[in-house]
Image (spheres, coloured by chain):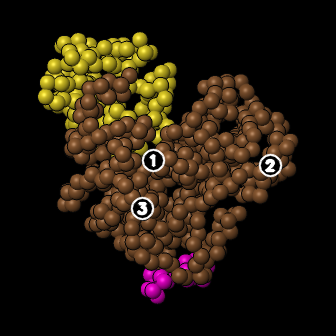
Chain colours: A yellow, B brown
């Protein structure tokens, strides 16, 4: 697995990737239930950055030499088969990864003291943001290709 | 006994090195020597453990099968006592000798104990001559402090030292329901990385959170028969105290190479590839003076992340993959009673630096960027730290930020704030 790339010129800034990421990381994985009935909404692991006419979705770049992994004090972050994995059960919310990530792609959940990041929808095949992007701005880039 | 790679130390630096070595060489015999009998745990997590935020099991840094999976032989609970560089052998306290091909010194640091009347500390055994007095750098420390607090006889705790470790210890003890007083020698909090404003704002936040801090004081005397009962400050003030934690900083642990051919300044001297002055001998982490990109100099940087990253570079070089360490500076990600603070690099205001600042004292928001010739050399962010990594990236890569300087302090500064060309280059 590689990483998700966003074609800036195609992104329309609709933020549906954020919405679907929340759904995929919710308990029910059902959009109505996830937004209406679940106690707390899941935190999206992708974030759309927008300024004037320009927008793009940004998620973990799954760096070859991942600074966040080097900085992680708890061992929650590690690299496995080319994917930067985050084990939230080990995360203590020290925000060392936030300081280390050169893209600002780590999402802080201050209420729960946890960091979150793109997990490439582990086990799903095509990541949901890629599948649901209405303008095909998102695609999976396989190992630098 | 003989091995290709011998690592003295089983913490961040040692683990960083083994992981790098195993990426390159799966087979070469690798031995780690550790005087502690635990498997690798994170020192940086002991405040979380003390506070009861995590279980003991979560303090361990790698899975239980880490050594087996990586084909590492561990000799634990034993100290290395001497090195024979001519024959490339390390001698253990029980007389065992280990011959090495490449050696890494990742011996870490020891707590510094300021001299006080009524208290002495045995550096070899790591014990005080009074009960109820602890350092706070090892898992043993945390376990013993926790046990002492859980005994129910402890009410008033004093933490000597207001650095990162001291403040985290104090916060943990408050969460356990103790009355806590922090005694701090300098007026300025974290003087290495904080300026006056950051220090003032964090102090105020600590006070509002219920922490009593006495700055500008030292402890003159520790009183009590067998256990600590009270302490006396330099001005004569007495404070009742049944738990005293000394967190007054750390000193590099260099006794193994003191007086040998390995050059030692304040810490072990290394070059950009983490090599010491002796061939095939490397050093990393708290015991070494490592490269700091903000100062463009070699300095003591006793931090978890820099130890790991430095160990990684040492590991690569130990197995013949040439790499330069350009990764770290004094980079701190902290939180005090829920207030997240980032501080990295240079905090100075004078000496040819350009300083950009924005303060919202009431909201506890502070953003400060220190520039030298258009390059970021220091940053402090309080609250809204989510994009802090961009600043560290600019610092590390020496990126000229003058074209978008006016953006840097904006609350929503992010990747999109960068010129398209730079952004594109960064995303590659």
Residue A40 screen position, x and y as percent: 22, 36
Tell me the residue at 67%/24% (across/down).
B26
Whether the residues at callouts 3 and 1 have beta carbons within 8 Å, the answer is no
> How packed is label 2: few (under 14 Cα within 10 Å), some, or many (20 or more)?
some
User: In the drawing, what numbered circle is on residue B294?
Assistant: 1
Of helix, strand and loop, which one carries label 3?
Answer: loop
Labels 3 and 1 in the same subunit: yes
* Disc 2 target residue: B83
Of helix, strand and loop, which one carries label 1?
Answer: loop
Judge from the rendering whether residue B278 lies leftward or rightward of residue B291; answer left or right: right
Q: In the rendered image of this protein, does residue B232 appear above or below residue B403? A: below
Which residues are the magenta region? B222-239
Residue B411 screen position, x and y as percent: 21, 44
* Disc 3 target residue: B190
Q: Is residue B209 magenta?
A: no
> How packed is label 3: few (under 14 Cα within 10 Å), some, or many (20 or more)?
some
Work out whether mark 3 precedes mark 1 in sequence or the reverse, and give the earlier one.
Answer: 3
């Amino acid at each position: 697995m590689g990483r998700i790339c966003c074609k800036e010129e195609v992104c329309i800034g609709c933020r549906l990737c954020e919405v679907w990421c929340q759904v995929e990381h919710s308990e029910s994985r059902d959009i109505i239930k996830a937004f209406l009935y679940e106690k707390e909404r899941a935190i999206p692991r992708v974030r759309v950055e927008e300024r004037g006419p320009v927008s793009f979705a940004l998620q973990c770049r799954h760096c070859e030499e991942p600074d966040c992994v080097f900085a992680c004090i708890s061992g929650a972050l590690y690299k496995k088969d080319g994917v930067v994995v985050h084990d939230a059960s080990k995360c203590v919310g020290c925000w060392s990864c936030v300081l280390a990530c050169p893209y600002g792609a780590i999402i802080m959940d201050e209420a729960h003291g946890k960091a979150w990041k793109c997990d490439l929808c582990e086990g799903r095949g095509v990541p949901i943001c890629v599948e649901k992007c209405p303008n095909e701005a998102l695609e999976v880039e396989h190992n630098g290709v | 006994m003989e091995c290709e790679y011998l690592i003295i130390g089983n913490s961040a630096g040692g683990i960083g090195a083994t992981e790098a070595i195993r990426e390159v060489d799966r087979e070469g015999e690798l031995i780690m020597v550790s005087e502690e009998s635990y498997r690798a745990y994170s020192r940086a997590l002991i405040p979380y453990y003390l506070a009861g935020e995590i279980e003991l099991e979560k303090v361990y840094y790698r899975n239980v099968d880490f050594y087996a999976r990586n084909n590492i032989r561990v000799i634990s609970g034993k100290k290395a006592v001497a090195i024979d560089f001519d024959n490339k052998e390390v001698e253990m306290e029980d007389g065992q000798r280990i011959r090495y091909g490449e050696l890494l010194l990742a011996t870490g640091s020891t707590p510094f104990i300021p001299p006080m009347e009524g208290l002495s500390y045995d550096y070899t055994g790591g014990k005080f001559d009074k009960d109820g007095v602890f350092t706070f750098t090892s898992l043993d420390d945390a376990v013993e402090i926790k046990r002492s607090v859980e005994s129910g006889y402890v009410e008033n705790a004093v933490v000597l030292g207001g650095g990162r470790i001291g403040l985290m210890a104090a916060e943990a003890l408050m969460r356990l329901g103790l009355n806590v007083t922090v005694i701090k020698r300098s007026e300025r909090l974290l003087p290495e990385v904080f300026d006056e404003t950051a220090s003032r704002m964090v102090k105020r936040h600590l006070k509002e959170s219920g922490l009593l801090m006495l700055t500008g004081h030292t402890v003159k005397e520790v009183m009590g028969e067998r256990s600590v009962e009270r302490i006396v400050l330099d001005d004569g003030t007495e404070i009742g105290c049944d738990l005293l934690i000394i967190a007054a900083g750390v000193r590099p642990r260099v006794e193994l190479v003191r007086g040998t051919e390995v050059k030692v300044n304040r810490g072990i001297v290394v070059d950009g590839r983490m090599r010491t002055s002796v061939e095939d001998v490397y050093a990393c982490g708290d015991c070494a003076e490592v490269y700091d990109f903000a100062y463009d100099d070699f300095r003591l940087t006793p931090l978890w992340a820099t130890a790991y990253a430095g160990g990684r570079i040492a590991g690569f070089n130990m197995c013949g993959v040439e790499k330069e360490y350009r990764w770290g500076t004094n980079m701190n990600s902290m939180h005090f009673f829920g207030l997240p603070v980032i501080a990295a690099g240079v905090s100075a205001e004078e000496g040819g630096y350009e300083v950009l600042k924005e303060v919202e004292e009431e909201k506890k928001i502070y953003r400060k960027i220190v520039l030298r010739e258009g390059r970021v050399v220091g940053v402090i962010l309080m609250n809204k730290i989510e994009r802090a990594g961009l600043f560290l990236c600019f610092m590390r890569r020496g990126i000229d930020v003058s074209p978008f300087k006016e953006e840097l302090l904006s609350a929503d500064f992010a990747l999109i704030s960068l010129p398209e060309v730079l952004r594109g280059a960064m995303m590659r």
